[in-house]
Amino acid sequence: MSQTSSTTDKSRFEAMVSPGAHGLTSLGIDIIQVNVGLRCNQNCRHCHLECSPARTESMDWDTMSAVKAAASRAGASMVDITGGAPELNPHLRRFIAGLREVGLNVQVRTNLTVLLERGQEGTIAFLRDHHVRLVASMPCYQEENVDAQRGPHAYHRSVEAIRRLNAAGYGTERGLQLNLVYNPAGPYLPPDQAELEQDYRRELRDRFGIAFSHLLTITNMPLGRFGAELKAAGRDGDYMQLLKESFNPATLEGLMCRHQISVGWDGTLHDCDFNLALGLPVDHGAPTHITRFNPGALRGRRIVTGEHCLGCTAGSGSSCGGALA
């Protein structure tokens, strides 16, 4: 989906969720999500950002310093670090240490397998020592589904990473949160989050003796590799129709774009990670770069929307924190 088509669809989505002239607006900045780069050790089929080992985009230290200052000014409750594989950014540990020093809670989104890569030997201990919360991609509890999405051996490498995290206290000790993330293997909506969490617990405990804190279910967005795969199979229209027919107004209050802001690796500000993927910065007069961060101007900003936003409002809803309704 191009930026042009998303902008064209904007008024249609806004008409559905907010018939008034002001559109969908932010309710505050509780979380600052930071994409520290698009380099990843994997090349996942569902990745909306099309991350891979070949990507070179990476956030520099000056931008990270600006993010730390912005998070403090905004009074954010958390800095949520994502990628790519955030662990591959050479400044990550320094960034996390700086955020924790000023009292900010930190969460890192990991693909798990990167923790087994050469050069990552001390990463788990560092994250534990700095009380960093983890959100880990584990798109299914079945091997064939995980490997189909993420590549050969990804499942067993992920299980081994969880074993090491459990040994360090993640998912087993209070204060060391390890949440897993499910996303569908195809063009359909996630099942009930609470019920699926019980399935994950049973399967992973009984088969491998591993534990986690909570399960988050996330809907695949019709963007990036997943969007291209839908289009190649001629299923993009059917999937968008599913999202439209599954629209749930109860999801609107909790939409992540209304409670956070996303910072791209180059410092550009976006309403969410999906708008980042589309190259859509914040708009309607709000400052568009971290060096011009203004909490007052951004807290009540009008959100840039498009047809892809239906992915967050379908069924039980979807956000970086899982289901919404």
Image (spheres, rainbow, N blue to C red):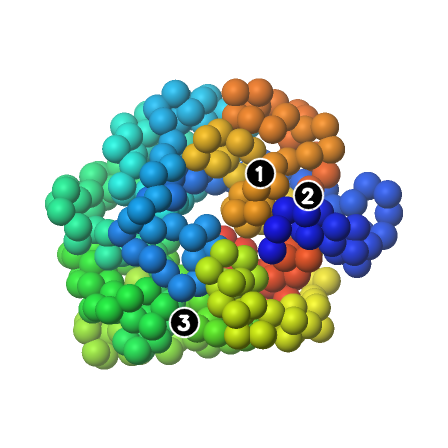
The one nearer the camera, 63 or 230, is: 230
Which of disc 2 and disc 1 is earlier in sequence? 1
Residue at the image point whose x is 69% and y is 52% from the top = 5
Report which residue position mark 1 lands on.
Answer: 270
Q: 285 above or below 125?
A: above
Report which residue position mark 2 lands on.
Answer: 304
Which of disc 3 and disc 1 is earlier in sequence? 3
Which of disc 3 and disc 2 is earlier in sequence? 3
Q: Amino acid at mark 2?
A: Val
Crowding at label 3, few (<14), some or many (≥20) Cα neighbours within 10 Å?
many
Q: Position of residue 230 (x, y in %)?
A: 54, 69
Q: Quadrant of the C terminus?
A: bottom right
Residue at the image point whose x is 50% and y is 56% from the top = 224
Q: 301 above or below 1?
A: above
Disc 3 is placed on an element classified as helix
Disc 2 is placed on an element classified as loop
Residue at the image point whose x is 24% and y is 57% from the top = 113
Residue at the image point whose x is 53% and y is 31% from the top = 268
Residue 47 seen anywhere in this rendered image of the structure: yes
Residue 169 seen anywhere in this rendered image of the structure: no
Q: Image check: 237 left or right of 264?
A: right
Look at the numbered discs 1 and 3 and tell me whether their residues touch, using CB distance below 8 Å: no
Q: Position of residue 190 (x, y in %)?
A: 51, 72
Report which residue position mark 3 lands on.
Answer: 197
The one nearer the camera, 120 or 60, is: 60
Look at the numbered discs 1 and 2 and tell me whether their residues touch, using CB distance below 8 Å: yes
